[in-house]
Image (tube, rainbow, N blue to C red):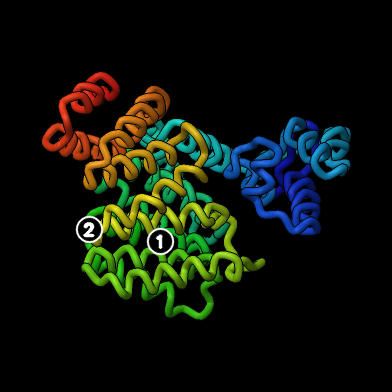
Amino acid sequence: MTETVNSTGVAVSDFSKAAKAELESRGMSLRALAKAIHYDVAFVSRVLNGKQKPSIELAVSLDRLWGASLAEMLKKPARIEQPSPNDYVRNAVAHFLEHDNRHGGDHVASAAKQVWKAEQASITSYEDKRRLADVAEIAEVAGWLLFDANRQEEARQAFMESRLLAELAGDKPMQWFALDMLAMQDVQEGKPGEALRISEELLSNPRVPGRVALLGRVRHARALALTGDRSRTLDALQRAQGALQDSISPRDPQWAWWVDEMEVIGHKGEALMSLGDFKGALPHLQKANELVRPGGRGALYYSVAELTALAQVGAWRESEETLTRISGILTRVTSSRSRARLKGTLRVIERDAPGWLKEHAKEAVSLG
């Protein structure tokens, strides 16, 4: 199979290797790089891991930051290419994830499911491991988008198919990812037993890289919180937070770029809410809101979580400010998962809040 090239003829892997070498030589993280050049971290991750075609705009931004000559690579004469049959799937994955980061999963969940189902049906040989791995990835992405769209049965099917295809492909990192997504969904649905089993499976595997083990600790903590075990929950979260820097290694799968301080802090806030400690949860949820990408799906998720904690402790003035923030985000983001949670929180406000806040909530938030 001929290597994928961009419109100028540069092999994706050539550019990716050069950019990744520059990144590693400077000791930068992907998130720090994306922030410095004002690009989405998911897009940068895919380019540097050879899964997304580079653009001249990105190359110029990298050159300005590093004083490198990466843009010159994109000016080389084009060569004859034979497009990979997996290009469409890889580009679809990048598009769906970028849309989700900006606008939530609702409007692209069905499209992602359609691509996954069509690509899976077109598999003709289980010997093509690369093909199986690519379809496993689109199944996982479809599962995540369906999860965010609150289509939970379909999401579970997608995660399970992703795990099976990854197993057939011999793709351990994607198997770990599918397992993590299943544990995440079990926590969402209040099933701590299955989430504990999966997280313990990840943590007991000596071959699992540090970043994956860190995620296992986070899922383990969230499941323990659902059982009411405060001591073990906080211990697991402390271990996860302590491993943030130590867990980084060349063995980390490319999908683990999003496992960062915000992720761990946000989960600590969520775990404390599961334990009924809404006051203790607030600083962590507020910190997560400071770190999250403004105005996107993550901002809606953590703003709703913060509002939930505020309403539970009767912090009505702070609730008013958070409601106003949520109102602005809702004009751009459609995430049924967060909207369902918001509806529950608005019922608490309608029941317990002073009249002026009830009126503000009605004016500020319309969920249809």
Q: First in sequence: mark 1 or mark 2? A: 1
- Mark 2 sits on what residue? 276
User: Would you say residue 61 is visible in this rendering?
Assistant: yes
At label 1, the amino acid type is Asp
- Image coordinates of residue 248 in percent, x first then y, are 61, 66
Residue at 88% x, 37% y: name it.
72
User: Percent from the top left, x then y, of residue 276?
Assistant: 22, 58
**Residue 324: image x %, image y %?**
35, 27
Quick one: 259 or 280, which is closer to the camera? Answer: 280
- Residue 258 image point, x, y percent: 53, 52
SS type, badge 1: helix
Mark 2: give few (<14), some (14-19) or many (20+) Cα within 10 Å.
some
Above or below for 172 versus 254: below
Mark 2, secondary structure of its residue: loop
Q: Which residue is mark 1?
A: 180
Q: Quadrant of residue 209?
A: bottom right
Q: 129 or 273: which is nearer to us?
A: 273
The quadrant of the picture occupied by the C terminus is top left
